[in-house]
Amino acid sequence: MNQAPVKILNLIEPAVTGLGYEFVGAEFTGQGKSAILRVYIDNDGGVLVGDCSKVSHQISGVLDVEDPISSQYTLEVSSPGMERPLFTLAHFERFKGSVVSLELNQSTLEGQRRFTGDILSVNGDTIHLHVDEEEVEIPFSLVKKAKLVAKF
């Protein structure tokens, strides 16, 4: 997955949950001045700008003290939105029946790297999708990035 390193996740998650929000996940992308640490939070009542600001302030304090990122980066805190990123097998299980778009680390499954389909189930470390009238089994370890597909 395109997640932030475990060391950073272990610092961020308690800061987010300590404020009463669900920690959805975090991504660390880019390099140098264009590096971004993107943190996704959620709440039963939704997430407002003030919530993001409060969490951002808390995370900034923790990251300033612990200093786990040696280079420059921009911290972004947001709700997962309608096209919610999926970071864990539990996320796939939670959104069973929903349409997901995912990208693999490599094109190893039937020569494909990208799949869009309905989440049928999660069995161990394998995600079962319904793609083009077929069931496709995708090992979670091959998933680089995954998100729900918004339906209107």
Image (cartoon, grey):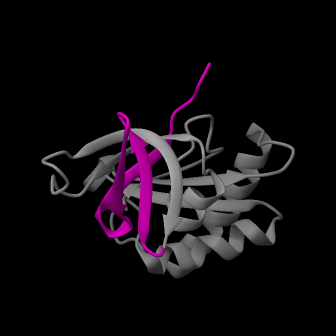
Instruction: Residue at 72%, 51% (x, y): give it.
Output: 42
Residue 113 appearing in the image? yes
Q: Foreground: 22 or 33? A: 22
Residue 77 image point, x, y percent = 60, 49
Instruction: Residue at 78%, 60% (x, y): give it.
Output: 21
Which residue of the protein is positioned furthest toward the front in this rendering?
Answer: 133
Residue 57 image point, x, y percent = 69, 58
State the image quarter where residue 18 is shown: bottom right
Residue 147 image point, x, y percent = 48, 44
Where is 30 relative to 3, above or below? above
Q: Foreground: 134 or 85? A: 134
Which residue of the protein is positioned furthest toward the top in this rendering?
Answer: 152
**Left-right relation of 75 to 146:** right
Residue 129 among those drawn in magenta: yes
Instruction: Residue at 69%, 76% (x, y): give it.
Output: 14
**Left-right relation of 122 to 112:** right
Q: Quadrant of the C terminus?
A: top right
Residue 114 image point, x, y percent = 27, 42
Q: Quadrant of the N terminus?
A: bottom left
Please count the marks in the image. Answer: 0
Residue 47 among those drawn in magenta: no
Magenta portion: prevailing SS class: strand
- Magenta segment, which residues? 124-152
